Image (cartoon, rainbow, N blue to C red):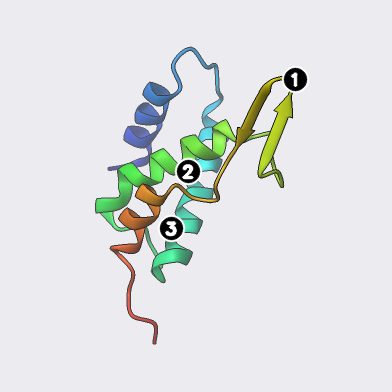
Amino acid sequence: MDNQQKLALMRTHLPGEEVQDGLLLSLLEDASSLICALTWRKEVPPELGNAQVRLAVIFYNRMGMEGENAHQEGDVRRSVTDLPDALRKEIFAFRRACT
């Protein structure tokens, strides 16, 4: 999946949002860096293209919450985990042996 396909997929996950391509590409790059760090690879495996998009969408949705694990306004409380377990398991399945 190339970057244009990933951008299109991200836009389907962010309906109604007017987001510049530069920001989305930056989030995709951040997601790529995290996936590479977690898998000890130099590139995101093609099989993790959708996981990269989902991770970039998570990064977008968490913008403004940098450094927070929980946030409360009135009766509304939000808490987040670093990486959802399902996504973590999907990414860790592609880990390389450390050398």
Q: Which residue is mark 1?
A: 74
Q: Which residue is mark 2?
A: 28
Front: mark 1 or 2: 1
Q: Position of residue 11 (x, y in %)?
A: 42, 24
Amino acid carrying mark 2 in the image: Leu
Secondary structure type for disc 2: helix
Q: Which of the two discs, 3 and 2, labels the residue nearer the N terminus? A: 2
Residue at 56% x, 34% y is 60
Amino acid carrying mark 3 in the image: Ile
Secondary structure type for disc 3: helix
Name the residue nearer the viewer: 31 or 29. 31
Residue at 45% x, 22% y is 14
Q: Which residue is mark 3?
A: 35
Image quadrant containing the C terminus:
bottom left
Name the residue nearer the viewer: 74 or 60. 74
Q: Position of residue 83 (x, y in %)?
A: 49, 50
